[in-house]
Image (cartoon, rainbow, N blue to C red):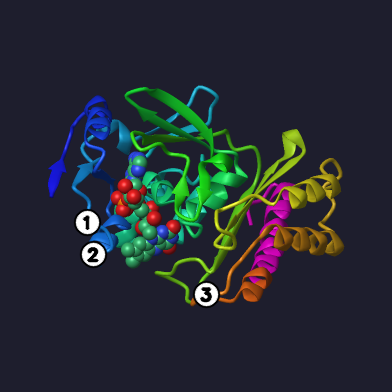
Amino acid sequence: MEFLAPTTWADELAARSEHPGAVPIAGGTDLMVELNFDRHRPAGLLDLTRVPELRDWQRSEDAGVRLGAGVTFARVMTELSGLAPGLAMASRTVGSPQIRVRGTLGGNLGSASPAGDAHPVLLAVDAVVEVESVRGTRRIPVAEFFTGVKRSALEPDELIAAVLLPPVAGPQQFAKIGTRNAMVIAVASFAIALHPGARRVGTGIGSAAPTPRVATAAEDLLAGELDWDGRSPLDASVVRRFGELVAAAADPIDDVRGSAAYRRRALAVMEARTATWAWDEYRTGVGS
Ligand SMILES: Cc1cc2nc3c(=O)[nH]c(=O)nc-3n(C[C@H](O)[C@H](O)[C@H](O)COP(=O)(O)OP(=O)(O)OC[C@H]3O[C@@H](n4cnc5c(N)ncnc54)[C@H](O)[C@@H]3O)c2cc1C
Protein backbone atom coordinates (compact mmCIF):
# COMPACT_ATOMS: atom_id res chain seq x y z
CA MET A 1 0.00 0.00 0.00
CA GLU A 2 1.34 3.41 -0.97
CA PHE A 3 1.77 5.81 1.97
CA LEU A 4 1.80 9.48 0.99
CA ALA A 5 3.00 11.91 3.64
CA PRO A 6 3.06 15.50 2.36
CA THR A 7 4.23 18.19 4.72
CA THR A 8 2.43 21.19 3.22
CA TRP A 9 -1.26 21.83 2.62
CA ALA A 10 -0.65 22.56 -1.08
CA ASP A 11 1.06 19.19 -1.46
CA GLU A 12 -1.81 17.45 0.39
CA LEU A 13 -4.32 18.92 -2.07
CA ALA A 14 -2.13 17.99 -5.05
CA ALA A 15 -1.73 14.44 -3.75
CA ARG A 16 -5.49 14.14 -3.15
CA SER A 17 -6.11 15.12 -6.75
CA GLU A 18 -3.35 12.97 -8.27
CA HIS A 19 -3.97 9.83 -6.17
CA PRO A 20 -7.75 9.34 -6.00
CA GLY A 21 -7.27 5.82 -4.58
CA ALA A 22 -5.36 7.08 -1.54
CA VAL A 23 -7.65 7.51 1.47
CA PRO A 24 -6.94 10.42 3.84
CA ILE A 25 -5.93 9.41 7.33
CA ALA A 26 -5.85 11.78 10.32
CA GLY A 27 -6.02 10.14 13.78
CA GLY A 28 -6.90 6.79 12.20
CA THR A 29 -9.40 5.93 14.96
CA ASP A 30 -12.14 5.20 12.42
CA LEU A 31 -10.08 4.26 9.40
CA MET A 32 -7.72 1.81 11.11
CA VAL A 33 -10.71 -0.13 12.45
CA GLU A 34 -11.91 -0.52 8.84
CA LEU A 35 -8.45 -1.64 7.69
CA ASN A 36 -7.91 -4.01 10.61
CA PHE A 37 -11.19 -5.77 9.91
CA ASP A 38 -10.33 -5.85 6.21
CA ARG A 39 -13.53 -4.02 5.34
CA HIS A 40 -11.55 -1.70 3.17
CA ARG A 41 -8.26 -2.15 1.32
CA PRO A 42 -7.38 1.20 -0.29
CA ALA A 43 -4.60 1.55 -2.84
CA GLY A 44 -2.90 4.04 -0.57
CA LEU A 45 -3.12 6.27 2.47
CA LEU A 46 -2.74 10.05 2.48
CA ASP A 47 -1.37 11.10 5.85
CA LEU A 48 -2.77 14.43 7.07
CA THR A 49 -0.83 14.70 10.32
CA ARG A 50 2.29 16.49 9.09
CA VAL A 51 0.65 19.77 8.06
CA PRO A 52 0.90 22.21 10.97
CA GLU A 53 -2.03 24.46 10.02
CA LEU A 54 -4.45 21.51 10.12
CA ARG A 55 -3.58 20.87 13.76
CA ASP A 56 -4.18 24.42 14.97
CA TRP A 57 -7.11 26.67 15.79
CA GLN A 58 -7.35 30.47 15.72
CA ARG A 59 -9.85 33.19 16.55
CA SER A 60 -11.57 34.09 13.29
CA GLU A 61 -12.26 37.62 11.98
CA ASP A 62 -15.81 37.63 13.37
CA ALA A 63 -14.51 36.59 16.85
CA GLY A 64 -15.58 33.02 16.31
CA VAL A 65 -13.13 30.16 15.98
CA ARG A 66 -11.49 28.49 12.99
CA LEU A 67 -10.59 24.95 13.96
CA GLY A 68 -8.18 23.09 11.69
CA ALA A 69 -9.57 19.72 10.66
CA GLY A 70 -6.76 17.97 12.54
CA VAL A 71 -7.60 19.50 15.94
CA THR A 72 -8.19 16.62 18.33
CA PHE A 73 -11.03 16.17 20.79
CA ALA A 74 -8.50 16.37 23.63
CA ARG A 75 -7.48 19.86 22.52
CA VAL A 76 -11.06 21.01 22.12
CA MET A 77 -11.73 19.87 25.70
CA THR A 78 -8.71 21.52 27.24
CA GLU A 79 -8.37 24.67 25.12
CA LEU A 80 -11.83 25.57 23.86
CA SER A 81 -14.33 25.18 26.68
CA GLY A 82 -14.89 28.96 26.58
CA LEU A 83 -14.94 29.53 22.82
CA ALA A 84 -16.73 26.31 21.91
CA PRO A 85 -18.54 25.14 25.07
CA GLY A 86 -20.95 22.72 23.37
CA LEU A 87 -18.22 21.14 21.30
CA ALA A 88 -16.03 20.79 24.40
CA MET A 89 -18.90 19.00 26.19
CA ALA A 90 -19.38 16.64 23.25
CA SER A 91 -15.62 16.04 23.02
CA ARG A 92 -15.51 14.90 26.65
CA THR A 93 -17.93 12.08 25.80
CA VAL A 94 -15.91 10.70 22.87
CA GLY A 95 -14.40 7.23 23.38
CA SER A 96 -11.56 7.18 25.89
CA PRO A 97 -8.51 9.38 26.56
CA GLN A 98 -6.59 7.41 23.90
CA ILE A 99 -9.28 8.04 21.28
CA ARG A 100 -9.60 11.71 22.25
CA VAL A 101 -5.87 12.43 21.80
CA ARG A 102 -5.89 10.83 18.32
CA GLY A 103 -9.42 11.45 17.02
CA THR A 104 -9.97 14.68 15.13
CA LEU A 105 -12.88 16.90 14.24
CA GLY A 106 -12.09 16.47 10.53
CA GLY A 107 -12.12 12.69 10.95
CA ASN A 108 -15.49 12.82 12.70
CA LEU A 109 -16.89 14.81 9.78
CA GLY A 110 -15.02 12.68 7.23
CA SER A 111 -16.69 9.54 8.56
CA ALA A 112 -20.04 11.39 8.55
CA SER A 113 -21.53 8.80 10.90
CA PRO A 114 -25.04 9.62 12.16
CA ALA A 115 -23.55 8.90 15.62
CA GLY A 116 -20.57 11.31 15.38
CA ASP A 117 -20.59 13.26 18.63
CA ALA A 118 -19.39 16.56 17.19
CA HIS A 119 -22.24 16.75 14.70
CA PRO A 120 -25.26 17.72 16.85
CA VAL A 121 -23.34 20.62 18.38
CA LEU A 122 -22.01 21.80 15.01
CA LEU A 123 -25.62 21.84 13.75
CA ALA A 124 -26.93 23.71 16.79
CA VAL A 125 -24.32 26.48 16.51
CA ASP A 126 -24.55 26.85 12.69
CA ALA A 127 -20.98 25.76 12.02
CA VAL A 128 -19.55 25.86 8.51
CA VAL A 129 -17.25 23.21 7.04
CA GLU A 130 -14.44 24.61 4.93
CA VAL A 131 -13.34 22.16 2.25
CA GLU A 132 -10.59 22.61 -0.26
CA SER A 133 -9.17 21.03 -3.41
CA VAL A 134 -6.76 22.12 -6.11
CA ARG A 135 -9.87 23.64 -7.74
CA GLY A 136 -10.51 26.02 -4.84
CA THR A 137 -12.28 26.42 -1.50
CA ARG A 138 -15.95 25.84 -0.59
CA ARG A 139 -17.75 26.71 2.62
CA ILE A 140 -20.57 24.28 3.37
CA PRO A 141 -23.09 24.98 6.16
CA VAL A 142 -22.90 21.87 8.32
CA ALA A 143 -26.64 21.23 7.84
CA GLU A 144 -25.88 20.66 4.13
CA PHE A 145 -22.74 18.58 4.74
CA PHE A 146 -24.37 15.26 5.66
CA THR A 147 -26.05 13.67 2.62
CA GLY A 148 -26.75 10.09 3.80
CA VAL A 149 -25.57 7.36 6.16
CA LYS A 150 -21.79 7.92 6.31
CA ARG A 151 -22.01 10.12 3.22
CA SER A 152 -21.14 13.76 2.90
CA ALA A 153 -21.02 16.60 0.40
CA LEU A 154 -17.24 16.20 0.10
CA GLU A 155 -16.13 15.73 -3.53
CA PRO A 156 -13.56 12.96 -4.24
CA ASP A 157 -10.69 15.44 -4.70
CA GLU A 158 -11.56 17.56 -1.65
CA LEU A 159 -10.18 17.59 1.88
CA ILE A 160 -11.75 19.13 4.96
CA ALA A 161 -9.55 22.09 5.86
CA ALA A 162 -11.35 23.54 8.87
CA VAL A 163 -14.55 24.01 10.80
CA LEU A 164 -15.74 27.58 11.37
CA LEU A 165 -17.66 28.26 14.56
CA PRO A 166 -19.52 31.56 14.99
CA PRO A 167 -18.95 33.51 18.21
CA VAL A 168 -20.71 31.97 21.19
CA ALA A 169 -24.14 33.61 21.24
CA GLY A 170 -25.51 32.05 24.43
CA PRO A 171 -25.61 28.85 26.47
CA GLN A 172 -24.88 25.57 24.70
CA GLN A 173 -25.57 22.07 25.95
CA PHE A 174 -24.98 18.52 24.74
CA ALA A 175 -26.26 15.19 26.04
CA LYS A 176 -25.61 11.66 24.89
CA ILE A 177 -27.13 8.36 25.87
CA GLY A 178 -25.19 5.16 25.32
CA THR A 179 -25.30 1.61 26.55
CA ARG A 180 -22.80 2.52 29.29
CA ASN A 181 -21.06 5.67 30.51
CA ALA A 182 -17.75 5.60 28.63
CA MET A 183 -16.22 4.22 25.41
CA VAL A 184 -19.59 4.15 23.81
CA ILE A 185 -21.15 5.14 20.54
CA ALA A 186 -24.28 7.22 21.07
CA VAL A 187 -27.61 5.44 21.05
CA ALA A 188 -28.99 8.96 20.71
CA SER A 189 -27.60 12.43 21.32
CA PHE A 190 -28.92 15.96 21.37
CA ALA A 191 -27.45 19.46 21.35
CA ILE A 192 -29.04 22.84 21.93
CA ALA A 193 -27.67 26.35 21.53
CA LEU A 194 -29.50 29.51 22.54
CA HIS A 195 -28.99 32.59 20.37
CA PRO A 196 -30.62 35.28 22.56
CA GLY A 197 -29.53 38.20 20.35
CA ALA A 198 -31.42 36.74 17.42
CA ARG A 199 -34.17 35.27 19.66
CA ARG A 200 -33.36 31.91 18.09
CA VAL A 201 -32.76 28.33 19.25
CA GLY A 202 -30.44 25.88 17.47
CA THR A 203 -30.71 22.10 17.77
CA GLY A 204 -28.90 19.00 16.58
CA ILE A 205 -30.05 15.38 16.78
CA GLY A 206 -27.51 12.54 16.64
CA SER A 207 -27.87 8.79 16.13
CA ALA A 208 -31.60 8.96 15.55
CA ALA A 209 -31.87 9.43 11.77
CA PRO A 210 -29.82 8.48 8.68
CA THR A 211 -27.89 11.72 9.13
CA PRO A 212 -27.40 14.12 12.00
CA ARG A 213 -30.20 16.66 11.62
CA VAL A 214 -31.83 19.75 13.08
CA ALA A 215 -35.33 19.86 14.57
CA THR A 216 -36.58 23.01 12.85
CA ALA A 217 -40.18 23.02 14.08
CA ALA A 218 -38.97 22.40 17.65
CA GLU A 219 -36.50 25.29 17.38
CA ASP A 220 -39.24 27.66 16.18
CA LEU A 221 -41.63 26.61 18.92
CA LEU A 222 -39.12 27.07 21.73
CA ALA A 223 -37.79 30.37 20.37
CA GLY A 224 -41.35 31.71 20.28
CA GLU A 225 -42.23 30.54 23.79
CA LEU A 226 -39.10 31.58 25.70
CA ASP A 227 -39.49 34.72 27.79
CA TRP A 228 -36.27 36.26 26.46
CA ASP A 229 -36.76 39.62 28.25
CA GLY A 230 -38.46 38.59 31.50
CA ARG A 231 -36.35 35.42 31.78
CA SER A 232 -39.08 33.53 33.60
CA PRO A 233 -38.55 29.79 34.20
CA LEU A 234 -39.28 27.35 31.42
CA ASP A 235 -42.84 26.10 31.46
CA ALA A 236 -43.22 22.30 31.72
CA SER A 237 -45.82 22.25 28.94
CA VAL A 238 -43.41 24.06 26.60
CA VAL A 239 -40.67 21.54 27.40
CA ARG A 240 -43.11 18.73 26.63
CA ARG A 241 -44.20 20.22 23.29
CA PHE A 242 -40.57 20.93 22.39
CA GLY A 243 -39.77 17.27 23.13
CA GLU A 244 -42.63 16.05 20.95
CA LEU A 245 -41.37 18.11 18.03
CA VAL A 246 -37.77 16.95 18.56
CA ALA A 247 -38.93 13.33 18.57
CA ALA A 248 -41.05 13.98 15.46
CA ALA A 249 -38.00 15.36 13.64
CA ALA A 250 -36.05 12.17 14.34
CA ASP A 251 -36.27 9.08 12.15
CA PRO A 252 -34.64 6.40 14.28
CA ILE A 253 -34.14 2.71 13.52
CA ASP A 254 -34.14 -0.42 15.67
CA ASP A 255 -30.61 -1.81 15.92
CA VAL A 256 -28.29 -3.63 18.31
CA ARG A 257 -27.76 -0.48 20.36
CA GLY A 258 -31.41 0.42 20.91
CA SER A 259 -34.91 0.37 19.52
CA ALA A 260 -36.45 3.26 17.62
CA ALA A 261 -38.95 3.73 20.45
CA TYR A 262 -36.15 3.89 23.04
CA ARG A 263 -34.30 6.45 20.92
CA ARG A 264 -37.37 8.69 20.70
CA ARG A 265 -37.85 8.41 24.47
CA ALA A 266 -34.15 9.15 25.06
CA LEU A 267 -34.39 12.24 22.87
CA ALA A 268 -37.33 13.55 24.88
CA VAL A 269 -35.38 13.11 28.13
CA MET A 270 -32.24 14.75 26.74
CA GLU A 271 -34.22 17.57 25.16
CA ALA A 272 -35.91 18.37 28.48
CA ARG A 273 -32.62 18.29 30.40
CA THR A 274 -30.55 20.30 27.94
CA ALA A 275 -33.24 22.90 27.27
CA THR A 276 -33.70 23.44 31.01
CA TRP A 277 -29.94 23.62 31.69
CA ALA A 278 -29.41 26.08 28.84
CA TRP A 279 -32.38 28.27 29.75
CA ASP A 280 -31.46 28.34 33.47
CA GLU A 281 -27.92 29.35 32.51
CA TYR A 282 -29.30 32.21 30.42
CA ARG A 283 -31.87 33.25 33.03
CA THR A 284 -29.52 33.29 35.98
CA GLY A 285 -26.30 34.09 34.16
CA VAL A 286 -24.70 31.12 35.93
CA GLY A 287 -23.47 28.00 34.08
CA SER A 288 -25.30 24.91 35.28
C1 LIG B 1 -12.76 2.70 20.56
C2 LIG B 1 -13.39 3.82 19.78
C3 LIG B 1 -14.30 4.65 20.40
C4 LIG B 1 -14.89 5.70 19.68
N1 LIG B 1 -15.79 6.50 20.32
C5 LIG B 1 -16.38 7.51 19.63
C6 LIG B 1 -17.33 8.35 20.29
O1 LIG B 1 -17.63 8.19 21.47
N2 LIG B 1 -17.88 9.35 19.57
C7 LIG B 1 -17.56 9.56 18.25
O2 LIG B 1 -18.09 10.51 17.65
N3 LIG B 1 -16.65 8.79 17.63
C8 LIG B 1 -16.06 7.77 18.27
N4 LIG B 1 -15.17 6.96 17.64
C9 LIG B 1 -14.90 7.19 16.23
C10 LIG B 1 -13.70 8.11 15.94
O3 LIG B 1 -12.82 8.21 17.04
C11 LIG B 1 -14.15 9.54 15.56
O4 LIG B 1 -15.05 9.49 14.48
C12 LIG B 1 -12.98 10.45 15.22
O5 LIG B 1 -13.44 11.77 15.14
C13 LIG B 1 -12.29 10.08 13.91
O6 LIG B 1 -11.22 10.98 13.74
P1 LIG B 1 -9.82 10.47 13.17
O7 LIG B 1 -8.94 11.66 13.05
O8 LIG B 1 -9.30 9.35 13.94
O9 LIG B 1 -10.30 10.00 11.70
P2 LIG B 1 -9.66 8.92 10.72
O10 LIG B 1 -9.94 7.56 11.20
O11 LIG B 1 -8.25 9.29 10.40
O12 LIG B 1 -10.55 9.24 9.43
C14 LIG B 1 -11.94 9.01 9.46
C15 LIG B 1 -12.53 9.28 8.07
O13 LIG B 1 -12.46 10.66 7.77
C16 LIG B 1 -11.64 10.89 6.62
N5 LIG B 1 -10.88 12.10 6.92
C17 LIG B 1 -10.12 12.35 8.03
N6 LIG B 1 -9.67 13.63 8.00
C18 LIG B 1 -10.13 14.17 6.84
C19 LIG B 1 -9.97 15.45 6.23
N7 LIG B 1 -9.28 16.47 6.81
N8 LIG B 1 -10.56 15.66 5.03
C20 LIG B 1 -11.29 14.66 4.43
N9 LIG B 1 -11.46 13.44 4.96
C21 LIG B 1 -10.88 13.20 6.16
C22 LIG B 1 -10.81 9.64 6.44
O14 LIG B 1 -10.47 9.41 5.09
C23 LIG B 1 -11.76 8.57 6.95
O15 LIG B 1 -12.70 8.24 5.93
C24 LIG B 1 -14.55 5.91 18.32
C25 LIG B 1 -13.59 5.08 17.71
C26 LIG B 1 -13.02 4.05 18.42
C27 LIG B 1 -12.01 3.17 17.74
Say if disc 1 is inside 8 Å of ligand 1: no
Within 10 Å of disc 3 (Cα), the crowding (few <14, some 14-19, many 20+) is few
Q: Is there a contact, CB below 8 Å, between mark 2 and mark 1? A: yes
Q: What secondary structure prevails in the magenta region?
A: helix
- For disc 2, the marked residue is 38
Q: Can I make out residue 94 in this image?
A: no
For marks 2 and 3, give the CA distance.
Answer: 23 Å
Q: Residue at x 77, y 38 (%)?
A: 199
Q: Can I make out residue 220 in this image?
A: yes
Q: Is residue 39 above or below residue 170?
A: below
Q: Please tell me whether residue 286 belongs to the stretch shown in magenta.
A: yes
Q: Is there a contact, CB below 8 Å, between mark 2 and mark 3? A: no
What x and y, as percent, mark residue 67?
42, 36
Task: Give amino acid for label 1.
Answer: Arg
Task: Give amino acid for label 3.
Answer: Asp
- For disc 3, the marked residue is 255
Q: Residue at x 22, y 31 (%)?
A: 18
Mark 1 or mark 3, which has the lower sequence index? 1
Task: Give amino acid for label 2.
Answer: Asp
Residue range of the region highlighted in magenta in the rendering: 266-288
Locate residue 265 relative to residue 108 in the image: left or right.
right
- Camera-side residue: 74 or 218? 218
- For disc 1, the marked residue is 41
What x and y, as percent, mark residue 50?
20, 37
Mark 2 or mark 3, which has the lower sequence index? 2
Q: Residue at x 81, y 50 (%)?
A: 221
Q: Please tell me whether residue 89 belongs to the stretch shown in magenta.
A: no
What x and y, as percent, mark residue 178?
51, 71
Within 10 Å of disc 2 (Cα), the crowding (few <14, some 14-19, many 20+) is few
For marks 1 and 3, give the CA distance.
Answer: 27 Å
